[in-house]
Image (tube, grey):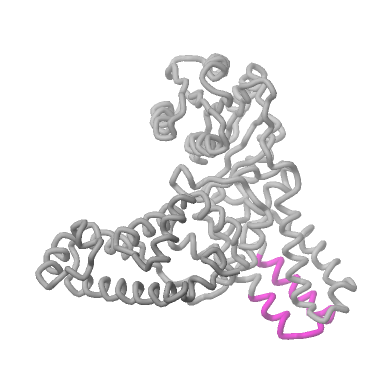
Amino acid sequence: MFDSLSERLQGVFGELRGHGKLSEADVDKAMREIRLALLEADVNFKVVRQFVNHVKERALGAEVMESLTPAQQVVKIVNEELIALMGSGDSRLAFSGRPPTVILVAGLQGSGKTTTCAKLARFLQKDGKRPVLIAADVYRPAAIDQLVTLAERVGAPVYAPGAHVDPVDIATDGVAFAREKGDVAIIDTAGRLHVDDELMEELVRIRKAVKPHNILLVIDAMTGQDAVNAAEQFKQRVDIDGVVLTKLDGDARGGAALSVRAVTGKPIKFSSTGEKLDDFDAFHPDRMASRILGMGDVLTLIEKAQTDISDKEAARLEERLRRADFTFEDFLDQLKQVRKMGSLSSIVGLLPGVPGMKELKNAQIDERQMDRIEAIVFSMTPEERRHPDVIDGSRRQRIARGSGTQVADVNRLLKQFREMKKMLKQMAGPKGGLLGKLPGFGGP
C-alpha cells in the first residue's frame, strides 16, 4: 500500500535535508517531484493541483524559510495537508436512539461489498452491538449464500428469504427482523459492473423504504480513479454518508484513498486491509499519513496487540518470565498471539522507519518459516515441550520426521530456544536482574 508514493516522497525529503536552508528554487523543485509522485499514485489531478498549491504556499512562509530545520518543517506541512486531504468530515457512524440502526451498504460488483457487510458486523460486535445481516442482493449468483456463510462465521443473525423476492421487500422485512434479533441492521444491496440507472433506482427505492441512518459506499482501492468516479456518481444519485475502502493491502498506488474524500466531500469511515474478517477498522487519516511518509503506525500496532493479546495471557507470561520458567508451550502460545495480529509483513510495515528502508521493504519475509517452527513444536510430546533437555538424538529424528523437516532444523530451533532461556534467566537474575529494573516488572 502506497509503496511507490512513499518511496518517492521520502526521496524528495532526503534531497531537502541535504540543503540546510531552502531557497524558493529548492521548494519549487520539491513541489514538482511531489506533484509527479501524486499523479503516478493515480491521485485525481484536481486534487493534486490543490494539494501542491497548499503545501507550496505554506512552505514558502516564515515557518519554513526562517526555520533552523526547514526540511523537517516541509515534512510536517505535507503530513498535515495529507491528514486534511483524507480527514475532513465526521467518520463515525450515526446510531439511532430507537434501534435498529439501519446501515445500507452499496457499491459496484467486485468491490468486496458482501464481505464488507460481514466485517462491519464483526467490528460492531466488538463494540457491544448486536448486528443483523440482510441479504438484498438477489441478482449476483451465490451472493445470498455467501452472506449466509459469512454470517455464520461472524455469529450474527441473517435475513435471507431468497432470490425471488423484491429487494425493497427484503430490506423492509429485514429491518423488522433486526428489530427483534438485534440493534443494527446491515443491508447488503446488489451491485453492477458499472453505474447504471437500474442500480441507482433500486437503491433509491430501498433508501425511501427503510430510511437508513447510514449509507456506506464500498469501493475497491485497487481500481484507482475509476473507484473515485463511481463514488462521485453514487454521491450525486443516492447521497452517501461515507466510504469504505477495500483491498488497501494490495494497492501499491493509493490514489483512491487520497482522492475520494476531496472529490465527494464524504469521509472515509472504514478501511479493509486483508482477507480475514478482523482485517477491518475505522479509518484514521493521521495514521495513514504517517505510513505514507514512512513514519510507521505505532498506534495501530499497539491496538492490534491490545486486542489480540489478553491481559490474562500477558500476566501469565510475565509470571513465567519472572521465574525464568519459559517453555516451548509458552513459546507456541506467543507465536499464535503474533500470528493473530496479522502477517509479519503487515506488522513490520507499521514500525517507524521501516517503510523507507529498502533492505527491509524489499526483503521477502518467509511466513512459511513460522509454519515450520510450529510444526516442529507440535511434533514434540507435552513432556518434551515442558522439558526440552530430554530431547536426545532419537527424539530429534522422530520430531523431524513428524514435522516434515530436517534434524538440522530441529537442532537449530533447540539451540535458539536455549539461548533465549539463558537470556531470560540473566534478565530475571538475582533480585530481579534486568527484569526487576524494567517498568511493570518491579522497576520505576
Stretch of the chain drawn in magenta: 11-37
In-image side of 64 versus 267 (left or right):
right
In-image side of 168 versus 316 (left or right):
right
Res. 382 image quadrant: bottom left
Q: Is residue 174 visible in this depiction of the protein? A: yes
Total labels drawn: 0
Residue placed farthest to the front in the image? Answer: 431
Residue 198 pos. (x, y %): 58, 25
Judging depth in this view, the residue of 335 and 56 nearest the camera is: 335
Residue placed farthest to the right in the image? Answer: 62
Judging depth in this view, the residue of 101 and 37 nearest the camera is: 101
Residue 74 pos. (x, y %): 77, 71
Query: Quick check: 129 above or below 71?
Result: above
In-image side of 391 versus 363 (left or right):
left
- Please name the residue shown 16% across and 64% down the image: 399
Query: Quick check: 336 above or below 207?
Result: below
Quadrant of the drawing holding the N terminus: bottom right
Res. 176 image quadrant: top right
- Please name the residue shown 90% across and 73% down the image: 62
In-image side of 258 versus 364 (left or right):
right
Label the magenta part by its dominant secondary structure: helix
